[in-house]
Amino acid sequence: MKKRNLFALLSAVLMMGTACTHEEPNGGNGVEVAATKFVVAATSSEATYLLTMDNLKTGATSIYGNGYEVDNATHWVFYGNKYAYRLVYNQGNAGITTSYVLDEYGEIKERNINHEIQNRFTTHGIYGDQIITAASGATAHTDDAGNSQYGVTVTKINVENQTLNTQTFITENMLGTGEYCTLSGIVESNGKIFTAVCPEGVSVYGIANNSHLLSQEALELVNTEGGISGTVNPNQVWVAIYNNSDFENPTIITDNRISYATSRYRSQYYPNIAADDAGNVYVFSSSYSTVQEGIQKTNLPSGVLKINAGGTTFDSDYYVNFEDASVADRAMYRVWHIKDDYFLMQMYTDKGDDKSHTVNTNSLGIFKASSRSFSWVNGLPAADVINSMSRNAYCHDGVAYIGIATTEEGAQPTIYVIDPVTATATTGAVVTSTAISAMGQLTNQ
Amino acid sequence: MIKRILPLIIFFVMVAASVVARNPHKASLFGKVLDENNKPLEFVTMFVKELNVHAISDEQGRYHLHLPPGTHIIRVYMLSYQEEVKQVEIKHGERISVDFKLMPEASELEEVIVVAKGGATRVNESAFNAVAIDATTLHNSSQDLATALNKISGVKLRESGGVGSDMQLSLDGFTGKHIKLFIDGVPQEGVGSSFSLNNIPINFAERIEVYKGVVPVGFGSDAIGGVVNIVTNKKQGFFVDASLTYGSFNTWKSSVNAGQTFANGLTYEINAFQNYSDNNYKIQTAVKDLSNGQIDKDKIETVRRFNDTYHNEAIIGKIGVVRKSWADRLLFTMRFTNSDKEIQNGVRQEIVFGEKRRKSYSLMPSVEYLKRNLFTDGLDLNLTVGYNYNVSHNLDTATRSFNWRGESIYNGGSIGEQSYQNNRYASNNWNGTLNLTYRLGEMHEFMLNHVLSSFDRKTLSSVNAADNAAVASSFPKYSMKNISGLSYRFTYHNYFNLSVFGKYYNQHSSGPRNASTTGGFSYEMFSENVGAFGYGAAGTVFITKGLQAKLSYEKAYRLPTIDELFGDEDLELGAIGLKPENSHNANVSLSYNLDIKKNGFYIEGGFIYRNTKDYIRRTINSYSGGLYYGLYENHGRVQTTGFNAEVRYNYSHWIQVGGNMSYLNIVDKEKYVAGNTLQESTSYGVRLPNTPYLFANADVSFGVKDCFAKGNFLTITYNLQYVHEFPLYWETHGNQRNKQRVPTQLSHDLSLLYSIQEGRYNISLECINLADAALYDNFSLQKAGRAFYGKFRFYFNR
């Protein structure tokens, strides 16, 4: 018999740092069943429309005459099935972050409190009742010569009392390598925050104050602006473990079996870190540094390490190399947790060093962490006819939903339903629009 | 670079040499042509039939004919005027002066106040879909050029705030890079923001011309939507025109224009103006609580803008000679402009900045040479060469966070309200315009035009140190455009004329491209050539007196800018092999003008058609569902059909009333989504979003002559502007209940002008936005409420 949980407990259970959420069925024992709808954020060439559906596995909907019109998001984050947040970073283009709920009629309603995230964040995640974004950049703290120290600014939005506050901390030499860093992925496990620390390069401040930590070959890479662009330590991974969202005194652990744990799409640092149902934290790496040259190029293949539940060290026995022919024979790009220890993986379609934004990443597979096995998902359109995939997979009730638009005649963006156990995909609802941006579920509170 | 300039220099030298070697034995006939008010008439044809010799009067009404000794019959004529014929006897080596006075064709002359005259009439009656307004009638107003343009049918101005704010001008829906600005026929691309239509006072112009869709060859440019040409004042004798304006929001504007033309032909002119405004008008908005970061959109407050101060200054000096035998005009000009603009908000009004600003200055020397009847009668040469150096500086270095009440808190150490910027960019722009016109008899005219413009931009300093964007922007971007045009016009008396023309566009560009094959960053210089051949025709017929029909067509092009080819400083990637945008543009119109006794009546109706393809736009990055980064590609077809109408009536000087309206149906005709796919677009057949499509203007004006004293004139004018609501995004998408729209705008302006001593002293009082309405040209960006401006102007011309 499935456990029956009251709504009050739902929002506290297992919020991971990805768009994948776990839910228990609602209602039962005389509690009134409130309106619940699936929400699809579908885009036109100009804006986004929030459509509501009863079922993502079948049927059709369209943005013609339908949907709550909103400006485009940088990211959609569904906080359980309570709130949908439209995170926007401040580029001068609609930089106001808004959030939405489902009203008693099953319609989308905008909450009256908006926020402004005043930086170009590169990663985000959920911790407790907060949505946290992080951005790296020059700070106002300088040395005597006026060189700016680089740091990370985290913006924390409390979804319940709707307050926003920011915190800036310096990342110069955070890893002892003389480099400044950014964070990638914010994952909660066992009440702590796990985040991958990715070195970005050496700032002018770093050259002036920490050059003794750099090798001779690294110093030769200083560019005309006086810094080094890109890390000179690509053959290591670092994860910081914070006790809470005060972001103080992290425990920083490192390993040299995989490269730094992120994948890149222009300015975004996609999270390569995810937890399973048992609380084990898996640290993946796309080995993005294959795009660099010389000492900045990594020689480590794309793989995954594990931090056991409750622990603060990398498990020395656990390592999987995705690029091995017996596993996936390809590098990984994105990862989402579906259920148990099944992960949906988005892979680079072709082998090779090129991981720029123009290469094809339209291949999906299922990774079962305990058995270290990988299977390609079958039933999807071929990678070369896929024009776009929704930025995040939506994991619900043991399956993963992803929106795909192909280049075929007459095709419209379609939701595909992926069963991790069988690694098969079936077509779901068709959403007539330009592309599907995100999916989630909202229940009237 | 030298290779291109050298042929021009040689040509210039030849021209100078030829004018010296004129036949000294011929006799000269010269003089002035005036209208019935003794004002000089430009573009009047003086024709000596048996010799097939003719001349055209200049902007001061002066003409010059070289004739062999003997008796000659001189015919003098111009559209809308009665022809004059005189017989002249001239002896060998003699120089005789004969003046002509032309009477307009309307029989009742006395109290007809002609609204448009001279050059403006010529443009309005040309075969092109062109409108000209006589700016001299607006010289007592405190408005700028853009506000005056906004009243022309089919033209829409959209400002994001008050004085000096970002503005966008559209002609029949075409905007931005699709329309080009000219001043006295010289292209103004690349001059920077310190000298733009909404910071130049109306006193700067004598006439404003707008050419829509089909552009005469004389404007060498890739203007797919049309051209705006500002014609500056050309006064004779000694003149001083000084004015001072003070108005709401601590607005101060002043301008001085003075100059003189001496009998020996030496001329000088100084033109200086400045604008200053705090722009601290009130707006309605939600205000962020700085203690907890909440913006409650249900709590709207009325606050004053506090970081919107704008000021700009410009000084233009000209010196040269006119009316010499070797030059009808040779002028050296130096122009310096400077501007400083605080930036109060982003693209949405909710995003407020407290310290962000932008500064810019530019230096523009130029030289102009005009010679009529070069080598032979009927061949006119006009050559302008100019250089523009422009520096712009973007500053966003605040370490505080602001809200709409002007409160701020320390933000913890991150820098920049939008994103950390302390970047200076410099651009260099060379341009040369050559116009050769040849008139053969009274019926044939050929024109050859060539415009060369080169542009390069580089970063002088930037704060993003260890950044790939900085590396990319350290490479200069360069482009050189050569546009040539050839046209032939056939004129049959005052009945009809027809022009046919061809244009050749060529652009050579170079800039950084990411040459890395592994997906990293490795910038190298690449160069590209783009070319296209355009053509068109324009004709007009005067069916009966006062009834005119026009038809024009052009296959027009717009060449890609260097940002589209190479990306901008924000790591936008440019595109290889971008084709120019192209469009089939057609216009047809009918107008009727009737003057009966003291009543003047005018009506005009016109249709436009535009079929534009290969739109250059940023691709929809369908992966992210957003539009932040993009590649530029040719994607898009847009079809425009439109209608505009204008009606005007005046009774002598007592009353003038009129209005115009425009309706545009601008529709997306691109079947597929961008990005090389057969997925059908959900916006096919839908009207283009965020574009005003139905708008109208109306005005009524009362004039009291000899009011309070003889020679004084009182005018009261009321203006109305209407813009029908339009959606921010595609009309057919989304639940119609919560679609975002720019609401219907209705604004009223009232002004009072008292002119003393025939315009020597002028006092005007204006009230803009009389009803204190909440006005929005752009979604969420509120403009000023009710504002008052007072202007005092002194004008003297001997």
Image (cartoon, rainbow, N blue to C red):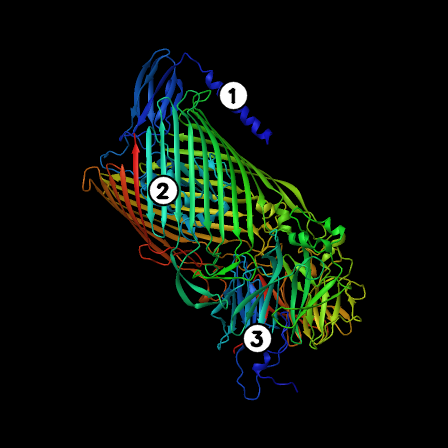
- What amino acid type should be assigned to the residue bearing mark 2? Ser
Q: Is residue B11 in view from this perspective? A: yes
Specify the label residue B254 is tagged with.
Answer: 2
Q: Which of B422 and A235 is in front in this view?
A: B422
Q: Distance between the residues labelled 2 and 3?
A: 61 Å
Q: In which quarter of the image is residue B792?
A: top left
View extreme (front): residue: A144
Q: Do the residues labelled 1 and 3 touch (CB within 8 Å)?
A: no
For image coordinates 49% across by 75% down, the residue present is: A103
* Residue B754 left/right relative to B341: left
Q: Mark 1 falls on what kind of element? A: helix
Disc nearest the viewer among 2 and 3: 2
Q: How far apart are marks 1 and 3 (CA)?
A: 81 Å
| Neighbourhood count class around disc 2 (C-alpha, 10 Å): few under 14, some 14–19, many 20 upward | many
Judging by the rendered image, the residue that carries numbered circle 3 is: A81
| Disc 1 and disc 3 on one polypeptide chain | no
- What amino acid type should be assigned to the residue bearing mark 1? Met
Please report, as a chain letter, where disc 1 is located. B
Q: Mark 2 falls on what kind of element? A: strand
Q: Is residue B127 in view from this perspective? A: no
Judging by the rendered image, the residue that carries numbered circle 1 is: B14
Total marks shown come to 3
Q: Nearer the viewer, residue B28 or A99?
A: A99
